[in-house]
Image (cartoon, rainbow, N blue to C red):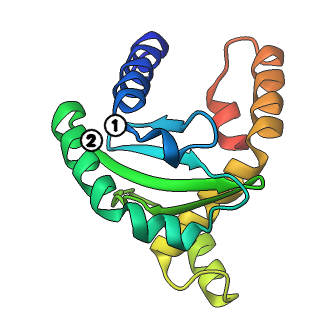
Amino acid sequence: MTEQRYHELQTRVADWFAQRLPAGWLAGPAGIDIDRDEIVLVLPLDQRTHRGEFRENTRDARIKLAREAEETFGRKISWGTVRDGTRQLFTIVRTAVTAQLAMPERRVLDTLIGAGVAADRSDAVAWCIRLVGQHEADWLRDLGDATAATPTSRPELRTQI
């Protein structure tokens, strides 16, 4: 999805939910994140609202809204809240991903399992992705610097990563 199409979709989704979310649910604008499988709405709560009570008290209305939105946008709807700067997702989509890995990559995953960091290869892949997410700004900057320093030869760059 191009940046422009993503922005247009995010605007449509934000407008759609702004018209339908009860005002009493929100202590500010809802956070919206979208990919090809899922739309995640993170609802800001005020300090007096208990997450568990909010989740339970709004369940039926959220399910109804999610069904309508899923039909409208062709993606699963997930929910979360943010309060006091802490974000908590309470429904999310887990999507299977298939990857063909050579022995060196499988060894990395198996090492993580052996060290007790991950329960299985799927968990190890997820752990690696979270690690990349934590360091992505630095790594992307370094990658940009390396790309700028490498005239036209990209195969070496791939092996460095």
In this figure, which residue is indicated by the disc labeled 1? 36
Identify the residue at horizontal 19%, vertical 41% (top origin). 68
- Kind of residue indicated by mark 1: Arg
Task: Compare marks 1 and 2 and give the one earlier in the sequence.
Answer: 1
- Which quadrant, please, contains the N terminus? top left
> For the C terminus, which image quadrant?
top right
Closer to us: 15 or 99: 15
Q: Position of residue 116 (x, y in %)?
A: 66, 89
The image quadrant that residue 31 belongs to is: top right
Task: Please determine whether, in this image, residue 33 is positioned above or below residue 99.
Answer: above
**Above or below, 97 relative to 39:** below
Q: Mark 2, residues whose alpha carbon is within 10 Å: few (<14), some, or many (≥20)?
A: some
Q: Name the residue under label 2.
A: 75
Report whether residue 106 is seen.
no
Query: Looking at this view, is 100 or 39 the one in front?
Result: 39
Q: Tell me where residue 146 sits by quadrant.
A: top right
Q: Is 99 placed left or right of 161 in the picture?
A: left
Foreground label between 1 and 2:
2
Q: Are marks 1 and 2 in contact (CB under 8 Å)?
A: yes
Placement of 87 over or under 1, stated as above or below: below
The quarter of the displayed image where residue 5 is located? top left
Under mark 2, the amino acid is Arg
Residue 89 visible to an observer of this rendering: yes
